[in-house]
Amino acid sequence: MKPFKALIVQWAMILIVGMASGCSPPPPTQSLDIAQALSSDEDSACYDRAKKSETINLPSDHGPHNGFKTEWWYYTGNLKSGSGRHFGYQLTFFRQALACRTAPGPSKWRTNQFYFAHFAVTDTQNQQFYSAHRMNRQSVGIAGASRSPFRVWIDAWSAKDIKGPDHARPGSIQLTARDQEMAIDLTLVPEKAVIFQGDQGLSRKGPGPFDASHYYSIPVLITQGKLEIGNESFEVLGKTWFDHEWSTSALGDDAGGWDWFAIHLDDGRDLMVCQVRKKDNSPNEYGFGSISFADGTYEILGQSDFSIQAVQLWKSPKTGRQYPARWKILVPDHTIDLEVSPVMDGQEHSHMFVYYEGAVRVTGPVTGLGYVEMTGY
Amino acid sequence: MTLLPLIRTCFRTSKSHPLRTFLLVFGIALGVAGTVAIDIAKTSVSRSFDLSTAALTSRSTHQVVGSQFSLPQSIFTKIRTHIGIHDSAPVITAQVQVKELNFQAMTLMGVDPFSEKKFRAVGFQQQDRQFSGNLAHMITRASGVLMSSSLARAHDLKVGRHLTLMFGDREVQVPIAGVIEGKDTTVGQAFQGILLADISLAQEILGLADRISRIDLVLKDESEIEAVKNLLSPSMVLVKTDQQNQTIRSLSKSFETSLTAFSMLTLFMGIFLIYNTVSFSVARQRKLNGTLRALGATRQEIFWAVEAEVMVYALVGSVLGLVLGIALGKGAVHGVCATVSDMYFTLTVSQIHISPVTLVKGIATGLLASIAASLVPALNAAGTRPITLMQPSGGETSFKGYIPGLALAGGGMIMGALMIFSRSESSSTLIFSGVFLVFGGSSFLSPCLVLGLTRLIPSLLGSVAGLLKKGAGPQMTLAGMALRNIRRSLSRSSVLIASLMVVISVYIGIDTMTTSFRRSIIDWVEGHIGGDIHISSTDELNRSLDPVLVEKIQGLEGVSGISAYNIHKVFSRVSGEVHIFSYVRDLSEKQWTWTALNKIESDAIGPPGTGTTGVEPDGKSLNALLEDDWIFVSEIFARRNGFIPGPGAFVTMETLKGPVSFKVAGVFRDFFMGGGRVIVSRDAMKTYWGHQDITAVQVFVKDRSAIDRRMADVLSLISDKTRVSIRSGLSIKAGILGVFDKTFLITSALQVLTAIVALTGILNSVMALILERSRELGILRACGADPGQIRSLVLWECTFNGFFAGVFALPLGYALAWILVYIVNYTAFGWTYEMQASMSTFVQALVFSSLAAFGAGMVPAIGASRISVAQALRTE
């Protein structure tokens, strides 16, 4: 699980008020008790809960699960142009149920679901980070998700199944998004088997019986297509990490933030580790992860299987927040000892939800590229 | 001698003459009040327009609207998903009446809260958790409407209570889901007239199915504009928001222009009244000032003592004027806003806006006019030798020297005004400058005219006296003396006459304008609403009448004919909302200001604006043109669309097939405001706007005394009586006239004001005039004149002053009426109508002017007749 995604969903709930009101959202630290918002199960009784008995069936479970309160589809990847120029990208879609049922009425504007999305591009060579967001209700076709064929979209930003003879491999996805300064049109073809996180897709998040989510990842999707920045257009190739998760659960009261990594190592292994921090910044016991091997097999990691240690800090000039900027990640059982650092400073989303999500580079005995997500700083 | 005791002396004198002091203060207050009241009305109407539209028009750069004010919502989906324009917001708006708000008209506005951030600045109380919860409900459950918190408080409405929304015959109950607190006052005020709902709820309340009113857009560049245009079907239009706002603003401008005209008139009258009051008030104290000078007061001290007194009363008068003006202004605002709402655009916010500028303007008018009025008398008082000061008007000789110069300047000013009015299109500022020049010029000319008349009339009086029997002779002698007195004290009497002339001319101008306008309206209503019984649908959503019903009505006994037609509102890029009519049968009698037939056959018809009705066109030929897809347009439509009459001239209209150019067969007179009206053939209505229904029927009965019976017959044919409204032609005509009569509220108030100004001014002036001449009257008494003769002399003088003012006011009033009718009203509203000058108005004005002066002279005349000879001659 990427806990921050859950946090963003909760955030969005609060911010709707601000959006509708045209007010600037209040500073998060002042206006929102994150832990309380996430741990509250008020009004949650009518939603579906993540349970062991419900196994994940693909491809149908690529689609939305409207009975659950929150859900997201997360694409992050590292790409290179023909000339070797590096770019990171992120396109994520979130669904949030605002109520268990849609209020009765004939209008097609009526809905109990809303969607939002983040789109970001990192231009490593020019040390530029571009970020944009969208938010819509699931009405009259301006946002939504469908099961078969799979599609999730907001406005003209979308991730959808590709059908046709050219894309024989099932599960191939087309990602499209355009904002003022950047655009992507990418084809993603899965190269490795799906990882069912946690216990066969049931990822525990807290001590309560329902503190869990359904969660699977596709560790490697070979990514090819076009990326535009300003007036420049690049043919790009690279790898994408995909997460899909849905739940009605909430996190424990003591959660203060998260550091999440998804890394494609050059030796063919792919690692995901997430460390949940308490309010005092020490790791709690619900860290999680997985390691996928070159042959497609994978192993689930628990909190005790890995460690993440920040070795350098960076202070955002925009928001004044201080984030770790260099880490040491150890997975002793798999002789993994990584030095991880962002490809550039400043990959901070500061428009509406303030958090850090950016491309990272791995050095050490094994090299690689990946993505980091940090919140609670 | 120090200044302070002098000032105290002045004030003590004022105190001992409370009536004079009251008149001084009242005069200043009235002048200021008139100016302030109209100014408040003007700025408030403008602000009410702004606020009523601010929340609706948003910060968009463009809007997509349907040719009939409705769009399928699928176009919004396409804009979002096909071309990815996220800065777009769907909007539904409709006028509803709210029972719980005393049937106040409100705009029900449906929006998608997720799309709103870029568009409308609604400030909510963030801290109010209960409210936040309700907003979430509004989004997820569309559970109710949001309304202004101050409006809710004013009507003791709380969250959860239900509002009854009424539109047409429909009533819908909706709960209040929350209240809107304006982040700043403008937003708060703008939402005074709005009920905000989630778009889903608004759509359901209004029964719009899958349709919305419009889409607001922020388009960044030409490529986005092109992309949107390419998505639209021919019945949809992409317009610039500025242009849309301009259309609404132009309506506001109509009222502003007309009110500015009245504001100018009141200002002018106000200045005159103040000048009159103050200058006479200072002149009254000549004697006191002379005494003070004799006692050793310096010139400067006298000057400042006079000015200080005037300034204090000017300030008191101005402040009183502000208070009075604000009270009057509030009444005027309600009147004007009601008129605007009745006639075209529902002003959901009726805002009384009292800008600091208005108040400063009011105070400045009072003070500056007082300074200007007191300056010359105060300088005179300060600069003359004491003995001269104690004698009557010493400046007369020097004043007479100025008369030719003044006359020349007056003539020049009138010429200037004529030049301004001869231009075909003048700006409002120029027009008002023209009005100012006319008044100024006439005032400057008045001494010369008075001089002429006072010389001409004695010879007439002489011959009259010769014709009359004995007994009338002495009266003629007194009349002659009175005329000579006027001539001698020209510096005073010409100001009195000029100010009375201005006031009386305003009375004539306004009376002539309103009479002409009302007559034209009556003719127009008679022509357009000729039917005896009117039948229309009350269903706002479906205005079609059952065609079978129309046939049945036609077949009713006692029915001589019917006019059946449909009316639909369509969007016009140029003029906003246009009403399109198509008749199955048209029995109405239109007043043509231009027709293609006439133009083709002869060039005898004047252009719109000249008021020329022209030859009644051949109805049959015109109808043939109509069938040939020509159209008739109202003159307001023609004006707004820049239509210049001429063979082959056309106008372009938005249709289901996109913009289509139509040749114009005729321009008819019309007094409804807004975007104007257009008449098309039934086929054109069907082809270009998709309607072939009948929405209204006018029934002509054979026997007008049996209208009630016929109405009952018609009613018996209708199964669902709640859906159809049946009214008699008489009640509709009365309703329309009632609406237009409201437009005269301000003008009527202005007429009352002119009467008060006239009476106050003349009373003030006459009292001062007589007072000044107490010495002269004493001499007359000493020479043997009896009190009755003195009374007659004074009354003759006053009556002559009033009569002269009345005579001069006749041409000036006529000119003012002409300006109001042909220039101000045409510029403001686009209405043309013939000026119908009524002899009775002129006679009334002349009689009123003379009688007012005569009446004002009564008290001073009695006072003069009681003058003690000894006291009057004490200084000799």
Image (cartoon, coloured by chain):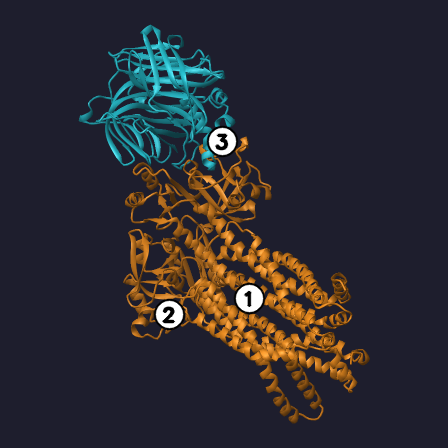
Instruction: Work out whether A126 lies above or below B449.
Output: above
**Residue at image x 64%, y 58%?**
B324
Residue B773 visible here: yes
What is the number of the mark on residue B607?
2
The residue tagged 3 is A26
Q: Which image quadrant is residue A225 in?
A: top left
The residue tagged 1 is B265
Name the spot of residue A283 as percent of width and height, x first.
Answer: 44, 13
Chain rendered cyan: A
Instruction: Give the number of the mark in front: 1 or 2.
Output: 1
Residue at disc 3, secondary structure: loop
- Give the camera-side residue of B711 and B355: B355
Q: The disc numbered 3 marks a residue on which chain? A: A
Mark 1 or 2 closer to N-term?
1
Q: Which image quadrant is residue A239 in?
A: top left
Name the spot of residue B571 as percent of width and height, x first.
Answer: 37, 52
**Residue at image x 45%, y 16%?**
A277
Mark 3 vs 1: CB contact within 8 A: no
What's under tag 3, amino acid-wise?
Pro
What is chain B's hue in the picture? orange
- Give the camera-side residue of B278 and B66: B278
Q: CA distance from mark 2 to mark 3?
A: 62 Å
Residue projecting furthest to the top: A333
